[in-house]
Image (tube, grey):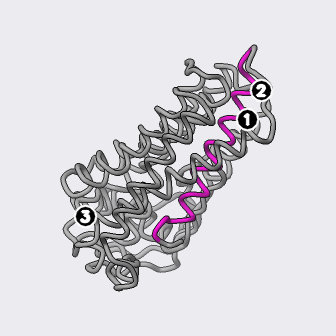
Amino acid sequence: MEISKPRIVVLLVITAVTSMYAANKLVPDAPQLDYLAYLHIIIAGALASAGSSALNHYYDKDIDPKMTRTSTRPIPSGRMKSSHVLIYGLIVSCISVIYGYFALNAVSAFFIALGIFSYVIIYTVWLKRLNTSNIVIGGIAGSAAAWAGWSAATGSMDLLGFLVGFLVFVWTPSHFWCLAMKIKDEYAQAKIPMLPVVIGMQRTSKYILGNTLILLPYSLMLSAFGMGIVYAVIAAMADFRFSFPVRCINSFSLGRNTFTCGRISAIFSSQVSSGSHCISKEVVRPISLAFLKSFPRPFRMPGCRK
């Protein structure tokens, strides 16, 4: 199971199913779907995610031992042969596209194939070890899951369906840059050019903030394209939830200056299309520190005590 990254499988399947359900309710003249239709997208999506994750394991077999987080994966730990993982990944990926074509439709099968291609070829093989844009462009794989679900319900792709899938693309950088900040040293050891490794924590925090300031209004904007009042309310609640006050660690050091801060209102990110997004204390702390360091010295937030 580990070779298929089951947690990612669940998230992408949720994304596809919710997109399929939304299309069925929002698109005029969309055919009514039964439970079997949802079962088909679950099976096709799970197979696609599992297969592409296995191929990612295979290609990264040389760098996984260099990172604590990945050193216990099946290949570097010796629990599975790399050739077996490769065969498994190729077979399952191909089955997912074929299954999607016959059980769903050709358009949905195309987006399933696009998701596999984006994650395996564009992200894993091409960009991950080459450029800091790896995560940004690699976000197409997540969007493809939403597009596959939408087209599974409608048999085509319209503007609203594209925008719903693109929401995942816009959300991806903030999410993964947060995670990259948490394990920056491991990425550096493996010589993977994640953004915090290349430009540092301080500038990465600004990129996260900037991307999130695009994400929040974009998520709300979808209601104007037909997502409806229920979506607008849920999106607004999610945006508010992640525009939360981050309490600084008391008396932490910023260079030569030490502050005891009250509240710093810092916007991070929201994911309104596929479950919830939680940010751990290990991620919040380096981002808040880096964000504070970006201000000119001397600096004190209103209400802070000496």
SS under mark 1: helix
Point 67% across, 43% down: residue: 40
Image coordinates of residue 284 in percent, x first then y, are 50, 67
Asked if the residue under mark 3 is in contact with the one under mark 1, i.e. CB atoms within 8 Å, the reply is: no
Between marks 3 and 2 in the image, the one whose residue lies nearer the viewer:
2
- Residue 25: give its label: 2
Q: Is residue 140 on the magenta stretch?
A: no
Does residue 301 sit above or below 85 in this rendering?
above
Asked if the residue under mark 2 is in contact with the one under mark 1, i.e. CB atoms within 8 Å, the reply is: yes
Q: How many C-alpha atoms fall within 10 Å of the one at disc 2: few (<14), some, or many (≥20)?
A: some
Please tell me whether the stretch drawn in magenta is mainly helix, strand or loop.
Answer: helix
Cα gap from disc 1 to disc 3, whole angstroms: 39 Å
Residue in the foreground of this view, choosing between 56 and 247: 56
For label 1, the residue is 21
Point 53% across, 54% down: residue: 266
- Residue 55: give its label: none
SS under mark 2: helix
- Residue 197: give its label: 3
Image coordinates of residue 194 in percent, x first then y, are 28, 59
Q: Amino acid at mark 3?
A: Val
SS under mark 3: helix
Image coordinates of residue 144 in percent, x first then y, are 49, 38
Quadrant of the frame with the N terminus: bottom right
